[in-house]
Every structure is written in structure tokens, then in C-alpha cells.
Image (tube, grey):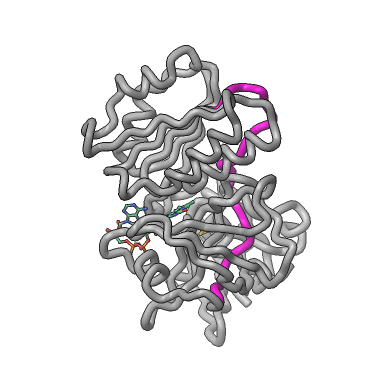
Amino acid sequence: MTVAQMFQRATVTRIITETPDARTFVLAPHDAPFPYRAGQYCTLRVQVGEEELYRSYSMSSAPETDTELMTTVKRVPGGRVSNWLLDNVAEGDELTMTRATGTFCLDDTDAPLLGFAGGSGITPILSLAKSALAGTARPVRLLCADRDATSAIFDDALTELAARHPGRLTVQRHRDSEHGLLDAATVAAFVGADTGADCYLCGPEGFMAVVRSAWAGPGRLFAEDFAPAAPAEDPPADINGATDLSGTVTIRLGKKTASVPRVARETLLGSARRAGLAPPFSCEAGNCGTCIAHITEGSATMIANTVLDDDEIADGYILTCQGVPDSASITVDYE
Ligand SMILES: Cc1cc2nc3c(=O)[nH]c(=O)nc-3n(C[C@H](O)[C@H](O)[C@H](O)COP(=O)(O)OP(=O)(O)OC[C@H]3O[C@@H](n4cnc5c(N)ncnc54)[C@H](O)[C@@H]3O)c2cc1C
Ligand code: FES
């Protein structure tokens, strides 16, 4: 792999209008086959005016049931990328995207699956439901909350899916316009006796908070948070906590090379920013792969990483949002 291969071009072969504010983009990646698991996402790199922006979008397709790769985008009021995608991208256009990443995936278990989807959170939940129905015997129940019927993405698709899997899939709709915002009592009533289920949760912050507060388990709760990444925290003290550091961090980004003195427990991404560069990033949590670079001199340890495999790490690849230098001198190249 090269850093460039983390990103690839994909042709938008079809666009499906799901609701007035949401569209599905059917993508044909140029480097097919494109492996992914239900519940995973890609990060798109788009040029909006002068700015290069990165945003993650979950797959609404599932590899077990769909021959096409699909991602579904809902407009966020004032949002730069979601509005740009919905208003500018046409069939036949090309987008730049990462390979699929993310851990919001099914485990190998027979436990019933409960899905809680709020608004655009239905995107990965639909993918997971399709995958579980096709690949396992697990019962699936979904609670889908939307402002009103008009804004409910995949309403018809869910009705059809339930009809194709009688007794295996049930869908409970919650419309804020009729019942007000979802409350803990409704969540508890929906869970019923399925307290040992695997529970998958995705939606706006308030929706996720209500479901979390009502979910006592003992089943497991998996959540995917669409909200923009919080500023990265300092690495734990056991990662390069020395205070008497000397050495230099050198970053190559495009045609620019910059060096800064090494600072205790600072990530490579942090050093690059301190050096006045603007390298790519998205999640700042080691999950999306947007910030990948190649170490050409020295070494670093990652705080978290769900993207790179052992071979890629051995080849010198690093998630710069997570990489803290181990060596006095280090050079990383975003290639
Ligand atoms: C792992 C992951 C998977 C995702 N999958 C999907 C998906 O399948 N479909 C989808 O439509 N979106 C998805 N998102 C959200 C998406 O990445 C963007 O955050 C969203 O499209 C808004 O980007 P923007 O550039 O339009 O808004 P920005 O210009 O970044 O933000 C504009 C304003 O909206 C607020 N805002 C940003 N994101 C959200 C949000 N998600 N909800 C509410 N307010 C927000 C910001 O705080 C800001 O005030 C996912 C996010 C993550 C992290
Ligand atoms: S920004 Fe997502 S892995 Fe670093």
C-alpha cells in the first residue's frame, strides 16, 4: 500500500433521492473489488471552494445483499460537505474516497439484534440489518425515529425488507411530529425482554443519549457517533511521557517540508499543525485512515488504530493523529 492508495477515485453511477434532504450515491470504486463489512464507512475528500474537506459516510448497502456500493447522505443545515454533495454531484461524476474502515460491525453471535436509528443514523443500521438477515438466523428489531414521515429515509425499503423476512424483522417507527421526542420509557418498552440482545445505536446526540440511558443490558451496546470529532486528547502518560525530550519532527506534505522541535506526547498530526502545515484528518481517533503517512526515518507508537494492519505498520505506515514519536528524530511523508 502507498498513502495514495488509501484514497481512490470512484464514479457515481446512480443517485437516488430518498427524501427531500437525503440522497443515496451509488459508487463504483476504480480499484475494484472494494472489500467492506456492513456498518463500515468511507471518508470522502472533496474540494469545496478553496477548501479541501474530509467527511465520513457509512455504507447503506451490505456486501451480502447488494451488488452496488451505496452511501446515503443527509443534508445538515449549513453543513459544507453534505450540502455540496447533494447540490453538486451528478451521475457520472467522480469522488475521492478512502477504503472502508470502522468497527460498527456485526459480531459472530446468535444474540438478537436491536437497532436504534435516528434520522441519517439509519444508514449503517440498514446495512447491518440486511447483513444479519442474509447471513445469520438472528431476529432483528429496529426502532427508527424521525421528525416526520417525509424525512424518514428508507421507509419503503424497510417495509419491503420486513415483508421479505416475515417473523425475522420488525420495524417500529417513531415520528416526533406525532409522539414528541423519543423518551426512555418508549425505548424500554421496545427492548422488552430482549435485554440480552446486541444493541446497535446511531443517530443525533440527544437520541443516542436517551437510548443509552434506557439500555441497562446485560446485552452489549455498540454505537456509531456521526458528530464531528472532538479535539484530540493528550496521549496517555505511558506513551512517550518523557519530559526531557530533544530531537526533531520533520513533516513532508506535498511540496512543503517543515521541522519542529519534538514535544513530549505530541502526536505527529499535532507537530505538523505546529509546523504550520494543514495535513488531512477527519476522526482524530484512529478510525478513518484519512491522516495516514509514511515514516521514512525514526519510529512512533500509535495510541489507537483500527485501520492499519501489522504488515502496513511494519512497512512504516502510521496514523499521524495517533502516532507519537519514539525516536529523537523522525520524518514522516504524507506522499
Ligand atoms: C463514522 C461516521 C459516519 C457517518 N456516516 C454518515 C452517513 O452515512 N450519512 C450522513 O448523512 N452523515 C454521516 N456522517 C456525518 C458526516 O460525516 C458529516 O459530519 C455531515 O455530513 C455534516 O458535514 P458537513 O460538512 O455538511 O457539516 P459541517 O460543515 O462540518 O458542519 C456544519 C454544522 O453542522 C454541525 N454538524 C456537523 N455534523 C453534524 C451531524 N452529523 N449532525 C448534526 N450536526 C452536525 C456542525 O457542528 C456545524 O455546526 C458520518 C460521520 C461519521 C463520523
Ligand atoms: S484522522 Fe482518522 S485515523 Fe487519523
Q: Position of residue 19 (x, y in %)?
A: 37, 55
Q: Position of residue 235 (x, y in %)?
A: 49, 48
- Asked if one can make out residue 264 in the rendered structure from this viewpoint, the answer is no
320 versus 135 height, above or below: below
Chain part drawn in magenta: 94-113
**Camera-side residue of 59 and 261:** 59
Residue pictured at 33% horizontal, 59% vertical:
20
Q: Above or below — where is 10 with respect to 187?
A: below
Magenta stretch, overall SS: loop
The quarter holding residue 129 reads top right
Residue situated in front as seen by the camera: 254 or 190: 190
Q: Position of residue 310 (x, y in %)?
A: 75, 52
User: Could you tell me which quadrant the N terminus lies in?
Assistant: bottom right
Q: Is residue 152 visible?
A: yes
Residue 171 is one of the magenta-drawn residues: no
| Residue depicted at 26% across the width and 64% down the height | 78
Residue drawn at 38 percent across, 50 percent down: 227
Q: Is residue 323 left or right of residue 57?
A: right
The quarter of the image that holds ligand 1 is bottom left
Q: Quadrant of the C terminus?
A: bottom right
Report the residue that reaches farthest toward the top: 193
Residue 265 % position (x, y): 50, 54
